[in-house]
Image: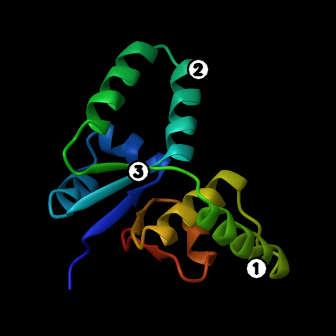
Amino acid sequence: MGVNTVLLDTNSYSRLTLGDRHIFNFLKRVETIYFSVIVLGELYSGFRQGSQKNRNITELEAFLRGNNIRLVKISEKSAEIYGKISYELRSFGTPIPTNDIWIAANSIETNSTLITYDKHFLEIKGLRVWDKI
C-alpha cells in the first residue's frame, strides 16, 4: 500500500527547494500534501534572516497554491496530541524541540506520514515517519 497523505517538515521543504530528487519523486505519487502552520512560521523566520527573503517567500506562496497542498492549523485535537507526545518524551528522557512536537501532532492528527530528515521524530510513538532518514 502506498502513502496517500504526507506532512512536510521544515527541512524537507528546504531540501525540496534545493532539488532533493528523493522528496520530489515521492511527492509526485502523493494525493495530499499537508503543510503545518508551524513549518510555515519556521520558514518565514528563516527567510527573514537570509539574503533571498523575497524570492523565498514568493516561491513558498506559489508552492502553497498547489492543488494538493492543504494548510494545517493548530486545533484542540492538535493540542491534545501535543500534550500526550510531550509528556511521553519527557517521561522517557527524550525531549525534542517544541515546534517539532507540534509538527508531529499535526501529522498524527491528519493521519499523514511525516517527511523529514530529523531522526528525533523516530522517538514519537504513533507517528509515521518517511523511511528515507
| Front position among marks 1 and 3 | 1
Check contact, mark 1 vs mark 2: CB within 8 A. no
Give the amino acid type for the residue marked by disc 2 in the picture.
Answer: Gln
- Specify the quadrant that holds the N terminus: bottom left
Pointer 1 or 2: first along the chain: 2
Identify whether 100 is placed above or below 51: below
- In the picture, measured across the screen, residue 45 lies left or right of residue 19, that is right
Numbered disc 2: secondary structure: helix
- In the picture, measured across the screen, residue 14 lies left or right of residue 64, that is right
Give the amino acid type for the residue marked by disc 1 in the picture.
Answer: Glu
Foreground: 61 or 118?
A: 61
Identify the residue shown where x is 21% and y is 63%: 30
Q: Which residue is most to the bottom?
A: 1
The image's mark for residue 28 is none
Identify whether 25 is placed above or below 71: below
Whether residue 96 is visible here, answered yes or no, is yes
Whether residue 18 is visible here, answered yes or no, is no
Pointer 1 or 3: first along the chain: 3
- Residue 132: name its quadrant: bottom left
- Specify the quadrant that holds the C terminus: bottom left
Q: Name the residue under label 3.
A: 12
Q: Name the residue under label 2.
A: 49
In space, the residues marked 1 and 2 are separated at their CA atoms by 34 Å
Identify the residue shown where x is 34% and y is 50%: 70
Foreground: 24 or 63?
A: 63
Identify the residue shown where x is 77% and y is 67%: 95
Give the amino acid type for the residue marked by disc 3 in the picture.
Answer: Ser
Pointer 3 or 2: first along the chain: 3
Count of residue discs: 3
Q: Name the residue under label 1.
A: 88
Numbered disc 1: secondary structure: helix
Identify the residue shown where x is 56% and y is 64%: 104
